[in-house]
Amino acid sequence: MASLTLRFVARTDMGLRRSSNQDSGYASARLIAVADGMGGAAAGDLASATAMNIVRTLDRDHDDDPRTAVMQAVRDANRRLGEIASVDPSVDGMGTTLEAMLWTGDHFVTAHIGDSRAYRLRAGEFTQLSHDHTFVQSLVDEGKLTLEEARVHPHRSLLLRVLLGRPDNEPDIGKLEGQAGDRYLLCSDGLTDMVADPDIADALAIDDLDAAADRLIELALAGGGLDNVTVVIGELVDGDGAVDAKAEGSEAQLVGAAAERPRRRPQAAETTATIAPVDPEEVRYSYVPPRRLGWLRYAVVAGLVLALVVVSAIALYQWSQRQYYVGVNDKNVAIFRGVPGHVPLVSLHTVVKRTDIPLNSLIYDARQSVSAGIDVVDVADGERRIAELSRDLVKDKPTPSPKPSASLTSEPATP
Ligand code: CA
């Protein structure tokens, strides 16, 4: 059996509406891969480039088990994203899709997470190999949505799984047998959202590999070019074909954010600013990163606490002004509205009725009670309590005193 060799090409384009390219692509005789970053202007680039630069280390001889190597590389990429986000909260929530196929010389090991796709063209038959980790795909799987409806669904870009630097999102790892003549296309959603499958199949069938890749990019731009678009094609050829591949140049190709030189269109920035003020990549994943508005949250909480304190103080003051007690005013017994005690700047009580009964004339216990303040329901209740106190006074005194009730003199409240 003749050994199979992978011919390859990688192309990316920023598209017509975006101001940066957050896709990364890689192609070599061993590895083809696409990563589509998300999480805002800087973070999307960083996420896809970080993941790609780790995953492309798979492009080496494998004495180890290739499947284990792929799983480890994806895990390393994911962990690295988590490390970056942990030291730079401004990129927390960034993530990337990953579509990778490692050719072992005998079969492919595949890795897939997110909504970038893998297709195969084999003897004229065009097949989607990957299964989108998207909300709409889950609805299609449940029979709640047709593929046609999914294509135009408002939440079609919402991802259920993506590399985010957290342990919970695992990629699909698979094994794939290859045949001579197979063509494999890995692409970001910038292609599949813009171009229908039959047109992708036609372009992929173009004889010349570079021409096929160019055509796919052209179709994506013609279809609207709303997103970054990346296409990576690998073609299995028998051993003789490897000579051609060498002639075309067997240098690995790294494109997009990972190449650190995204192709920029000068007019695209302006277009983006006016047409897409909200970057849809920010809301692709159901997870919403915390906003950098901590100070506003604190201010709102502080304001609420302050309001609560003020309202409570007012309520407490109003309550206090419905209380009455018998206490001491100017060494004489008196009836007060309010509560005993003092708060800076606020008067908690006022005299509503004075008497000419000196505190000193009361028996010891009564004197203590009056000094501390005796709670009463209202003024009349206060008068009754004072009359009782005066009776004690009368009882204790050897000589009769004037009638206590007569000693009460009404006065207007003085603040
Ligand atoms: Ca995209």
Image: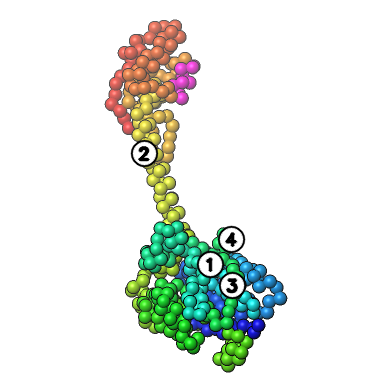
Q: Main secondary structure of the magenta part?
A: helix
| Gap in angstroms between the C-alphas marked 1 and 3 | 16 Å
Number of residues whose C-alpha sits closer than 10 Å to that of mark 2, classed few (under 14), some (14–19) or many (20 or more): few
Of the residues shown, which amino acid type is indicated by label 3?
A: Leu
Q: Residue at x 44, y 32 (%)?
A: 341
Q: Mark 1 against mark 3, which lies toward the viewer? A: 3
Q: Which of the two discs, 1 and 3, labels the residue nearer the N terminus?
A: 1
Is residue 298 visible from the viewing direction of this image? yes
| Gap in angstroms between the C-alphas marked 3 and 4 | 26 Å
Residue occupied by mark 3? 176
Q: Secondary structure at mark 2?
A: helix
Q: Position of residue 107 (x, y in %)?
A: 62, 75
Q: Which of the two discs, 2 and 1, labels the residue nearer the N terminus?
A: 1
The magenta-colored residue range is 364-372
Residue occupied by mark 4? 167
Residue occupied by mark 2? 314
